[in-house]
Image: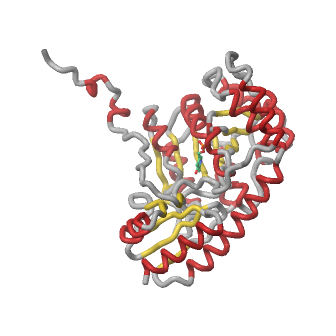
Amino acid sequence: MGRLDIKRLVKDNVRSLHPYEVKAYPCDIKLDANESPYPLTLSPRVRSEFNRVLRVLNRYPDPEARRLRGALSRTLKVRIDNILHGNGSDELIYYLITTFGGPVMYPVPTFSMYGVIAQALGEERIEVPLDRDFDIDVDRILTAIRRHRPKLIFLSSPNNPTGNCFSQERILEIIEYTSHHPSLVVIDEAYQPFSKKGSLVHFIRNYGNVLIMRTLSKIGLAALRVGFIIAQEDIIREVNKVRLPFNLNSISQAVALAIMKDSETVRSNINMITSERRRLFLEMQQIDGIHPYPSDANFILFRAERVDAIFNGLIKKGILIRNMKGAVDGCLRVTVGTPRENTIFLNTLKELSG
Ligand SMILES: *Cc1c(COP(=O)(O)O)cnc(C)c1O
């Protein structure tokens, strides 16, 4: 009896994909995934929210996540109908590409999921290189837009893995241009809370083709999987059609809501991270052979001569960062940790670069 070759049944675009792998390196100091180093402790209020949902685990979650979207709408000063909730922003990227299809355009290097999800859904990907300063190359992008007519353009600002915000004038040029050659521009603000440059949420008032994407993952709640898009109501209404009914579980809804009300702790953790980012950057600049790029996010991209030796040397000391080989050759990316973690990282980096 012949063995069934399951791959023959798989769609072509899926067959050539690789699963998103996070290699398990046993490391005490985890600076690889842009998480917050500060677990948000359960205040009495969060604890009581948590206990309340634990008593109704037999019931489906609120499919509309009304209370959570309501809280966010007050924070962002938009209407609740301008907000759609996702199981992390990753799920929302999935929904956007499912709803609008391709071509899907994005500058590179950037967050890998735009391309991965486009491929999983069998949509064409158009990758346009950033300029030398990791900013948007407007001429190239506008040319590519004319040529390929993308349905969706993803702009991560601050950008992962380069750390910089794109210049607002260039983002606006793309938005203005695509309001006539219809494309939707998705501004992924996963790292916006770490940036001094303001959010572009207000763009949604004036532009019917702009979406803003936010997440709680990088500000201390990665485990909950809570993300949002903010856009004009007609866009939200269409994307909401492909949303799975109970995509955001009750525990995540309740804990996210309670923690949003405790926003001072979140804010002070962010302040700690941005002040440590500055220290890390300045100290890394002093190390021979290490060239950090300025960052508006909670991580720093840096160039080094022997990236593999540094990456492996750090792992031997129990410190995990990200080797950007393949995405930004010759570079590594380190997430800002606690002051103690950053000091250990810096000392080890100095030894390895000496
Ligand atoms: C981490 C990251 C996300 C993923 O966010 P989730 O809400 O955890 O799915 C989205 N966009 C960018 C640019 C990221 O770096």
Relative placement, left or right, of 120 versus 38 is left
Number of marks present in the image shown = 0
**Residue drawn at point x = 83 percent, y = 46 percent:** 262
Between 303 and 179, the residue placed more toward the observer is: 303
Q: Quadrant of residue 352?
A: bottom left
334 vs 42: above or below: below
**Residue drawn at point x = 49 percent, y = 61 percent:** 321
Residue 177, can we see it?
A: no
Residue 222, can we see it?
A: yes
Tell me residue 92's x, y (percent).
Answer: 61, 35
**Residue drawn at point x = 54 percent, y = 64 percent:** 334
Q: Quadrant of residue 248?
A: top right
Q: Quadrant of the C terminus?
A: bottom left
Between 166 and 162, the residue placed more toward the observer is: 162
249 vs 166: above or below: above
Tell me residue 288's x, y (percent).
Answer: 48, 84
